[in-house]
Image (cartoon, helix red, strand yellow):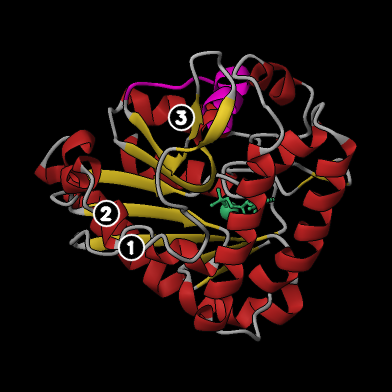
Amino acid sequence: MAQTNYRLCVILILHFQNTMKKGSPAQVVTIVADFDRTLTKYIHKGHVCATCHYVLEEGSLPELYKEKARTLRDTYFPIETNPKLSVEEKIPKMIEWWTKSHGLLETCEISRDSIQHCVSSSTAKLRDGCSWFFDELKKYEVPVLIFSAGIGDIIEEVIKQQSTMHDNMHIVSNYMKFNEKGQMTGFQNAIIHVYNKNENAIHDSAYFQNIEHKTSMILMGDSLGDLHMADGAEVDHKLKIGFLNTRVEESLELYKKKYDIVLVEDETLDVPNNLLRSILER
Ligand code: TMP
Ligand code: MG
């Protein structure tokens, strides 16, 4: 089910189509997308699918880790998705979650080589139509930024196994650090969690400077934190597509206020793909 501000969307799509006259898609359009539960499914065949972190939980890590990670998720995921809490109230809790979760992972002696199998045996699943989405954007050389509070190493592996990682795609995420024996020792940079995607430290990267001169952007996310993934990029037109996967009744009005299109319990990329067709293939 799509919930849309139709007038605004039509205007935005017309703007997008007009900008195409000013240059090639590669010059004028950019895509910024979250990963977990945006490019991947929330539900597949009635079962909740894994996020990047949950991929490791499903893998062959010690039972004690799994138990603790599950307890953390049961505590903090309801806070992440609670529409009654403000972002200010959520931020300290998200920092707590990511700090504890990453601290736990550091104790598990994860090997670089185990990631491939963790992903192939996991329930993480790209949305239906995701490969077409990636291929189409590559065809027109439209830059794609995947900006995720998940784990970069897992994202790369999911895309590699279920689709294609093209050279127009760039990932900003939490990347693991490995020692010379290939064992995980921590994470490379400061934590990216769902509500700090607006931080300057992240946006100072060369990649963000590269997208700033585009005129049109499609932003895709499933969390209200994702709305800030492109803060600071001065694009003329930004079309925001939100996936509302859970707590629908209590969150719908808020999502409709914040996103231009809200896709409710939709496990496909059909709407963004149709949009790309209407913009790129004219
Ligand atoms: P995203 O930015 O790609 O959506 O990734 C963030 C998601 O990761 C967020 O919805 C919560 C989830 N997550 C877990 O499932 N387990 C964890 O231990 C942590 C820290 C996050
Ligand atoms: Mg997400």
Q: Which residues are magenta?
A: 154-167
**Are the two marked residues, 1 and 2, in contact with CB atoms closer than 8 angstroms?**
yes
Question: x, y percentage for residue 76?
Answer: 71, 66
Q: Residue at x 64, y 80 (%)?
A: 83
What quarter of the picture does the C terminus occupy?
A: top left
Helix, strand or loop at label 1? It is: loop
Horizontal and vertical percent position of residue 160: 55, 19
Mark 3 sits on what residue? 134
Q: CA distance from mark 1 to mark 3?
A: 27 Å
User: Callout 2, which amino acid?
Assistant: His
Quarter of the figure with the N terminus: bottom right
The spot of residue 58 in percent (x, y) is 81, 34
Q: Which mark is residue 199?
A: 1
Q: Earlier in the sequence, mark 1 or mark 3?
A: 3
The amino acid sitting under disc 3 is Phe
Specify the amino acid type for callout 1.
Glu
Label 2 Cα crowd, 10 Å radius (few <14 / some 14-19 / many 20+): some
Could you tell me which secondary element the residue under label 2 belongs to? helix
For marks 1 and 2, give the CA distance. 6 Å
Does residue 194 show up? yes
Magenta stretch: dominant secondary structure = helix
Seen in the picture, residue 174 relative to 125 is either above or below; the reply is below
Q: Badge 3: few (under 14), some or many (20 or more) residues near its Cα, within 10 Å?
A: many
Can you tell which quarter of the image residue 159 is in? top right
**Disc ID at residue 203:** 2
